[in-house]
Amino acid sequence: MINKDQLVEGPFGSNACYEQTFEYEGKDITTWLCFGSGFTTSTLMVKDSELVNNAVATSPELYKDLMFEDKAGRVWLPATITLPQKGMVFIDGSNKEEWKWAAVKAIPVTETDKEIVQGQTHKMDMKNVKHFKQKDFMDALEVIGFFTA
């Protein structure tokens, strides 16, 4: 079984693109998460593939507008990172020129919330969202404790 992790150069000018290769159902799959840009893709995310078509069909318009195809034909989309007990990072904006990264921390569910978020111990604190510039994806990840155990 292949399992390889490394940092590589991404298509957005960052050398902080996390590449992971693993075997799934007998196939080698590689995924990329570019910490410099916040965009992600995989060897399965190619133009007109079922995976891309499903992602486009279920993504907000802003994600579709920001979709990028690299020289290898892979489709990159903005990442949404969710750590259920820590927080979430996502894009927030009105169009492809006017958007930012948003970070929200997870907070414990109150007794009042338990009916709404059944089975969950935490919810996202949307009242205290913090915004970051387009190039500050890693700063947004730090807010939610992505890099800490």
Image (cartoon, rainbow, N blue to C red):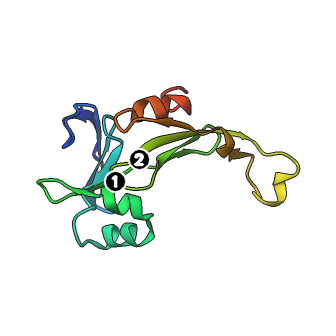
Q: Which residue in the rendered view is the most extreme toward the top?
A: 148
Q: Which residue in the rendered view is the most extreme toward the right?
A: 111
- Callout 2: few (<14), some (14-19), or many (20+) C-alpha neighbours within 10 Å? some
Query: What residue is at 41 percent from the left and 64 percent from the top?
Result: 61
Q: In the drawing, does residue 64 fall left or right of residue 130?
A: left
Residue pointed to by mark 1 = 96
Q: Position of residue 93 (x, y in %)?
A: 45, 51
Whether the residues at callouts 1 and 2 have beta carbons within 8 Å, the answer is yes
Q: Position of residue 45 (x, y in %)?
A: 27, 61
- Mark 1–mark 2 Cα distance, whole angstroms, equals 6 Å
Is any atom of residue 24 visible in this view?
no
Query: What residue is at 24 percent from the left and 73 percent from the top?
Result: 48
Q: What residue type is disc 1 on?
A: Lys
User: On the image, which quarter does residue 44 sit in?
Assistant: bottom left
Q: In the drawing, does residue 4 fall left or right of residue 109?
A: left
Residue pointed to by mark 2 = 99
Q: Is residue 105 above or below residue 49?
A: above
Q: Position of residue 106 (x, y in %)?
A: 66, 40
Q: What residue type is disc 2 on?
A: Trp
Label 1: element kind: loop
Q: Position of residue 89 (x, y in %)?
A: 50, 43
